[in-house]
Amino acid sequence: MRESESQPETPSMAARLPLLDGLRTVAAIGVMFYHAPELFGDTRLFTRTYLFVDLFFLLSGFVLTLSAEPKMARGLGTSGFMKARIVRLWPMMALGCLAAAAVFATQATAGEVFALLVLGMLMIPHLGSNIAIFPLNAPQWSLVWELVANLFHGLVLRHLKDRELLLLSGISGIALLWAIFHTGWNGSGPNAGFWWLAAPRVAWSYVLGIWMARRWLTHKPKPLANWLSALFLPLAALMLLPWLPLSLAQGDALASLVILPGLFWIAATARPPASATAMLSRLGALSYPIYALHAPIFLAFHFLQEGWITRLCSVAITLVTAQLVALTGPKLRRVFSGLRRTGDKAAPASAA
């Protein structure tokens, strides 16, 4: 029996932490603002919020441990787990690719755009690119790496004991530390030059998230901070990071290896009031659309005209589009599920 099998809380109690929904959207907005520096001039407020990608991997490992590992223990196989993850992630990736293809169609030939669209839809990185391994929609790199982490979760990580997870995360952390000082920052992943150095970046955070989730289940930690403070502390930390007397590599290493994991644990222990649960859930629904769609929207406005007014418009359009997607997405999934069930019922009759 592994160390975490004695779980004092049921999966249904632990699988949903509304504060983490809100935290995911705070992180997505931080990444979006990193890509809109003209809005803030020389203030440097969001120059390090690309590090929120590391928080996404940590959060994914944590949440999927709570929600999916109990299902896998009851018989859900890796193929079923991966099917669910692809169904969750691929449609928004595809929408981002289509939006970006429409933008690129005004700047490149139809053949070039079609080739990039096929690669994006199939989630195949363009390693020969001189800009990003997913040229149509650069943030797609992290979503593909998350699926890779999900696959290892289903095949290997869920079987490891807590000490083994901690050892693997520690080894990955050492590799990440080397990668940060080798490249000068913790930004490996989106560009072709050092795309492979995203592996320790993902492994450190994702595996640590799994270990944290198991500790959360077994120890039932008490809240360490007010829920509102816990929600915004990671954003405040990354906004203040540029003012610390540290080099870029030193600051990124400190944030990725110490600050963000510590603040994430504080957020995981926080308990928002019941009155805030619905608001946090609605906020959480915006996170994925914001992250997946902001780059092509920003690019469209960039091709029109550069400047802070243009960026402000692109941010506004991104938020409105994310809200529309959040509202219509579940309805479309319910319609699709209803049609699929109807088809399944009709199939035997047609076969007869």
Image: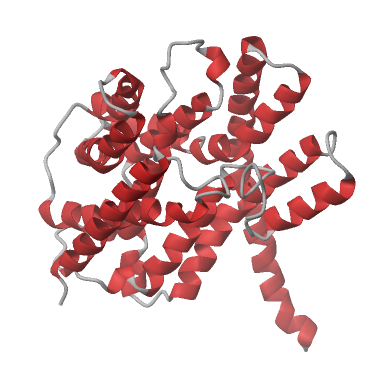
Residue at x 73% of width, y 75% of height? 346
Residue at x 17% of width, y 69% of height? 5
| Farthest bottom residue in view | 352
| Residue 12 appears in the picture as rendered | no
Nearest the camera: 132 or 45?
132
Quadrant in which the N terminus is drawn: bottom left
Tell me: residue 130, above or below residue 78.
above
Q: Position of residue 90 (x, y in %)?
A: 60, 55
Q: Position of residue 278 (x, y in %)?
A: 40, 33
Q: Position of residue 327 (x, y in %)?
A: 59, 37
**Looking at the image, how many numbered discs can be counted on the residues?**
0
Nearest the camera: 7 or 124?
124
Tell me: residue 52, above or below residue 84.
above
Colour scheme:
secondary structure
Residue at x 37% of width, y 66% of height? 153
Nearest the camera: 276 or 290?
290
Tell me: residue 136, above or below residue 306.
below
Give the image quarter of residue 270.
top left
Q: Is residue 273 left or right of residue 86?
A: left
Quadrant in which the C terminus is drawn: bottom right
Nearest the camera: 222 or 264?
264
Give the image quarter of residue 260.
top left
| Farthest front residue in view | 182
| Residue 250 appears in the picture as rendered | yes
Residue at x 34% of width, y 54% of height? 206
Tell me: residue 311, above or below residue 280.
above
Q: Position of residue 129 (x, y in %)?
A: 67, 49
| Farthest right residue in view | 110
